[in-house]
Amino acid sequence: MSKNIVKNIFKHIKLVIKHKWLVFKFSCKLGIPFRGFMHDWSKFSFEEFWESVKYYDGGVSPITRCKVDNGYSKAWLHHKGRNKHHDWYWVDLNAPEVAPIIPYKYVVEMICDKLSASIIYNGKNWTRNSEYDYWQIEKTRIIMNPKIEKFLTEVFIQVRDNGIEKAITKQNIKELYKKYCIDDKTKYKYEFHGEWKKID
Ligand SMILES: [Zn+2]
Protein backbone atom coordinates (compact mmCIF):
# COMPACT_ATOMS: atom_id res chain seq x y z
CA MET A 1 0.00 0.00 0.00
CA SER A 2 1.37 3.38 -0.91
CA LYS A 3 1.81 6.10 1.70
CA ASN A 4 -0.97 8.12 0.08
CA ILE A 5 -3.53 5.36 0.48
CA VAL A 6 -2.65 4.92 4.15
CA LYS A 7 -3.01 8.68 4.65
CA ASN A 8 -6.34 8.72 2.83
CA ILE A 9 -7.64 5.82 4.92
CA PHE A 10 -7.06 7.79 8.11
CA LYS A 11 -8.33 11.09 6.70
CA HIS A 12 -11.48 9.43 5.39
CA ILE A 13 -12.17 7.65 8.69
CA LYS A 14 -11.63 10.93 10.59
CA LEU A 15 -14.08 12.76 8.32
CA VAL A 16 -16.76 10.06 8.65
CA ILE A 17 -16.39 9.96 12.47
CA LYS A 18 -16.57 13.77 12.67
CA HIS A 19 -19.73 13.74 10.54
CA LYS A 20 -21.30 10.87 12.51
CA TRP A 21 -20.57 12.61 15.82
CA LEU A 22 -22.28 15.85 14.77
CA VAL A 23 -25.26 13.92 13.34
CA PHE A 24 -25.47 12.05 16.66
CA LYS A 25 -25.50 15.31 18.66
CA PHE A 26 -28.29 16.77 16.51
CA SER A 27 -30.26 13.54 16.61
CA CYS A 28 -30.12 13.48 20.43
CA LYS A 29 -31.46 17.05 20.47
CA LEU A 30 -34.29 15.89 18.19
CA GLY A 31 -35.11 12.76 20.17
CA ILE A 32 -33.90 10.13 17.70
CA PRO A 33 -30.56 9.03 19.27
CA PHE A 34 -30.80 5.52 17.83
CA ARG A 35 -31.12 6.84 14.26
CA GLY A 36 -28.18 9.14 14.98
CA PHE A 37 -26.09 6.22 16.20
CA MET A 38 -27.00 4.07 13.19
CA HIS A 39 -26.26 6.90 10.74
CA ASP A 40 -24.00 6.07 7.77
CA TRP A 41 -22.43 2.85 9.10
CA SER A 42 -22.56 1.52 5.53
CA LYS A 43 -19.69 3.91 4.76
CA PHE A 44 -17.52 1.24 6.40
CA SER A 45 -18.69 -1.48 4.01
CA PHE A 46 -16.20 -2.70 1.40
CA GLU A 47 -18.05 -1.07 -1.52
CA GLU A 48 -18.27 2.38 0.02
CA PHE A 49 -15.06 2.48 2.01
CA TRP A 50 -12.51 1.69 -0.70
CA GLU A 51 -14.03 3.92 -3.35
CA SER A 52 -14.03 6.84 -0.90
CA VAL A 53 -10.41 6.18 0.04
CA LYS A 54 -9.38 5.97 -3.61
CA TYR A 55 -11.09 9.27 -4.46
CA TYR A 56 -10.48 11.05 -1.16
CA ASP A 57 -9.85 14.75 -1.57
CA GLY A 58 -10.80 16.67 1.60
CA GLY A 59 -12.72 19.29 -0.39
CA VAL A 60 -14.76 17.63 -3.14
CA SER A 61 -16.87 14.58 -2.27
CA PRO A 62 -15.18 11.32 -3.34
CA ILE A 63 -18.50 10.26 -4.86
CA THR A 64 -18.44 13.28 -7.19
CA ARG A 65 -14.81 12.59 -8.08
CA CYS A 66 -15.62 8.96 -8.87
CA LYS A 67 -18.53 10.06 -11.08
CA VAL A 68 -16.17 12.37 -12.99
CA ASP A 69 -13.91 9.37 -13.63
CA ASN A 70 -16.48 6.63 -14.28
CA GLY A 71 -19.82 8.27 -15.02
CA TYR A 72 -21.34 6.72 -11.91
CA SER A 73 -20.40 5.75 -8.38
CA LYS A 74 -20.93 2.25 -7.03
CA ALA A 75 -20.40 3.60 -3.50
CA TRP A 76 -23.31 6.01 -3.92
CA LEU A 77 -25.62 3.36 -5.39
CA HIS A 78 -24.72 1.12 -2.45
CA HIS A 79 -25.22 3.97 0.05
CA LYS A 80 -28.53 5.37 -1.16
CA GLY A 81 -29.98 1.88 -1.52
CA ARG A 82 -29.47 1.17 2.19
CA ASN A 83 -29.87 4.48 3.99
CA LYS A 84 -33.42 5.70 4.50
CA HIS A 85 -32.30 9.23 5.40
CA HIS A 86 -31.61 9.85 1.70
CA ASP A 87 -34.43 11.11 -0.53
CA TRP A 88 -33.16 8.84 -3.34
CA TYR A 89 -33.74 5.75 -1.20
CA TRP A 90 -37.48 6.43 -1.54
CA VAL A 91 -37.64 7.20 -5.26
CA ASP A 92 -39.04 4.53 -7.56
CA LEU A 93 -39.74 5.77 -11.07
CA ASN A 94 -41.86 2.67 -11.79
CA ALA A 95 -44.16 3.02 -8.78
CA PRO A 96 -47.51 4.87 -8.75
CA GLU A 97 -46.10 7.02 -5.96
CA VAL A 98 -42.73 7.96 -7.37
CA ALA A 99 -41.69 9.90 -4.24
CA PRO A 100 -43.81 8.97 -1.20
CA ILE A 101 -43.93 10.89 2.08
CA ILE A 102 -40.81 9.89 3.98
CA PRO A 103 -41.60 8.72 7.55
CA TYR A 104 -40.85 11.17 10.36
CA LYS A 105 -37.73 9.57 11.90
CA TYR A 106 -35.91 9.35 8.57
CA VAL A 107 -36.65 12.97 7.55
CA VAL A 108 -35.42 14.08 10.97
CA GLU A 109 -32.23 12.07 10.39
CA MET A 110 -32.02 13.76 6.97
CA ILE A 111 -32.11 17.19 8.65
CA CYS A 112 -29.30 16.15 11.02
CA ASP A 113 -27.31 14.84 8.06
CA LYS A 114 -27.74 17.98 5.96
CA LEU A 115 -26.85 20.38 8.78
CA SER A 116 -23.84 18.32 9.79
CA ALA A 117 -22.56 18.10 6.19
CA SER A 118 -23.12 21.84 5.73
CA ILE A 119 -21.22 22.75 8.93
CA ILE A 120 -18.30 20.39 8.29
CA TYR A 121 -18.03 21.21 4.59
CA ASN A 122 -18.15 25.01 5.07
CA GLY A 123 -15.95 25.03 8.17
CA LYS A 124 -15.12 28.59 9.23
CA ASN A 125 -17.25 30.01 6.44
CA TRP A 126 -20.45 28.39 7.72
CA THR A 127 -23.29 30.81 8.46
CA ARG A 128 -26.97 30.39 9.27
CA ASN A 129 -27.67 30.96 5.55
CA SER A 130 -25.41 28.14 4.32
CA GLU A 131 -27.86 25.23 4.37
CA TYR A 132 -30.78 27.35 3.15
CA ASP A 133 -28.73 28.62 0.18
CA TYR A 134 -27.49 25.12 -0.66
CA TRP A 135 -31.01 23.68 -0.36
CA GLN A 136 -32.32 26.22 -2.94
CA ILE A 137 -30.07 24.58 -5.54
CA GLU A 138 -30.25 21.01 -4.25
CA LYS A 139 -34.05 20.87 -4.28
CA THR A 140 -34.15 21.59 -8.03
CA ARG A 141 -31.99 18.52 -8.71
CA ILE A 142 -33.93 15.90 -6.78
CA ILE A 143 -37.23 14.08 -6.97
CA MET A 144 -39.05 14.58 -3.68
CA ASN A 145 -42.59 14.57 -2.37
CA PRO A 146 -43.71 18.26 -2.46
CA LYS A 147 -44.92 18.04 1.16
CA ILE A 148 -41.48 16.94 2.36
CA GLU A 149 -39.84 19.60 0.21
CA LYS A 150 -41.98 22.36 1.77
CA PHE A 151 -41.29 21.01 5.25
CA LEU A 152 -37.52 21.02 4.72
CA THR A 153 -37.64 24.50 3.17
CA GLU A 154 -39.44 25.82 6.27
CA VAL A 155 -36.89 24.13 8.56
CA PHE A 156 -33.95 25.73 6.75
CA ILE A 157 -35.68 29.14 6.66
CA GLN A 158 -36.04 28.90 10.44
CA VAL A 159 -32.39 27.88 10.85
CA ARG A 160 -31.46 30.93 8.72
CA ASP A 161 -33.70 33.33 10.66
CA ASN A 162 -33.59 31.95 14.22
CA GLY A 163 -30.42 29.85 14.38
CA ILE A 164 -29.93 26.14 15.03
CA GLU A 165 -30.47 26.32 18.78
CA LYS A 166 -34.04 27.63 18.42
CA ALA A 167 -35.07 25.98 15.15
CA ILE A 168 -33.73 22.47 15.79
CA THR A 169 -35.83 21.39 18.75
CA LYS A 170 -37.87 18.22 19.06
CA GLN A 171 -41.12 20.14 19.55
CA ASN A 172 -40.61 22.56 16.69
CA ILE A 173 -39.63 19.90 14.14
CA LYS A 174 -42.51 17.67 15.21
CA GLU A 175 -45.00 20.51 14.78
CA LEU A 176 -43.62 21.48 11.39
CA TYR A 177 -43.78 17.87 10.17
CA LYS A 178 -47.40 17.69 11.31
CA LYS A 179 -48.17 20.96 9.57
CA TYR A 180 -46.63 20.07 6.21
CA CYS A 181 -46.51 16.30 5.93
CA ILE A 182 -49.50 14.90 7.76
CA ASP A 183 -49.73 11.61 5.99
CA ASP A 184 -53.19 11.19 4.59
CA LYS A 185 -53.89 7.81 6.13
CA THR A 186 -56.25 6.66 3.39
CA LYS A 187 -54.54 3.78 1.69
CA TYR A 188 -55.06 3.73 -2.04
CA LYS A 189 -54.97 0.76 -4.32
CA TYR A 190 -53.63 0.98 -7.83
CA GLU A 191 -54.19 -0.78 -11.12
CA PHE A 192 -51.62 -1.17 -13.83
CA HIS A 193 -52.64 -1.03 -17.48
CA GLY A 194 -49.54 0.25 -19.22
CA GLU A 195 -49.65 3.03 -16.65
CA TRP A 196 -50.72 3.29 -13.02
CA LYS A 197 -54.28 4.25 -12.12
CA LYS A 198 -55.61 4.96 -8.65
CA ILE A 199 -58.72 2.96 -7.74
CA ASP A 200 -61.18 5.10 -5.73
ZN1 LIG B 1 -25.87 9.10 4.30
Image (cartoon, rainbow, N blue to C red):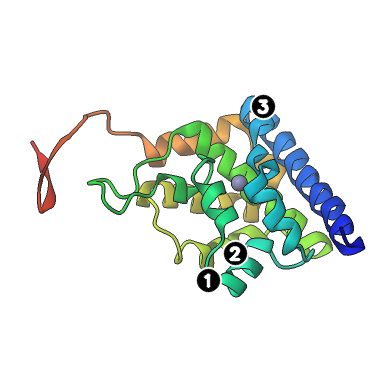
Q: Which mark is first along the chain, 3 or 1?
A: 3
Q: Secondary structure at mark 1?
A: loop
* Residues marked 3 and 2 touching at CB (< 8 Å): no
Circle number at residue 71: 1
Number of the front mark, 3 or 2: 3
Seen in the picture, residue 27 relative to 81 is either above or below; the reply is above
Q: CA distance from mark 1 to mark 2?
A: 23 Å
Instruction: Give the residue pinned by disc 2.
Output: 134
The quarter holding residue 24 reads top right
Marks 3 and 2, how far apart at CA? 26 Å
At 37% from the left and 41% from the top, the residue drawn is 101
Q: Position of residue 181 (x, y in %)?
A: 38, 39
Q: Which amino acid type is shown beneath numbered disc 1? A: Gly
Badge 3: few (under 14), some or many (20 or more) residues near its Cα, within 10 Å? some
| Amino acid carrying mark 3 in the image | Pro
Q: Quadrant of residue 29?
A: top right
**SS category of the residue bearing label 3:** helix
Q: Locate residue 167, reporting x and y percent.
A: 63, 42
Residue under circle 3? 33
Residue 184 on image: x %, y % = 28, 33
Q: Secondary structure at mark 2?
A: helix
Residue placed at 10% from the left, 53% from the top? 194
Count the marks: how many? Answer: 3
Residue mark closest to the camera, 1 vs 3: 1
Indicate the position of residue 197 as horizontal and vertical percent values: 11, 46
Q: Residues within 10 Å of mark 2 (few under 14, many from 20)?
A: few
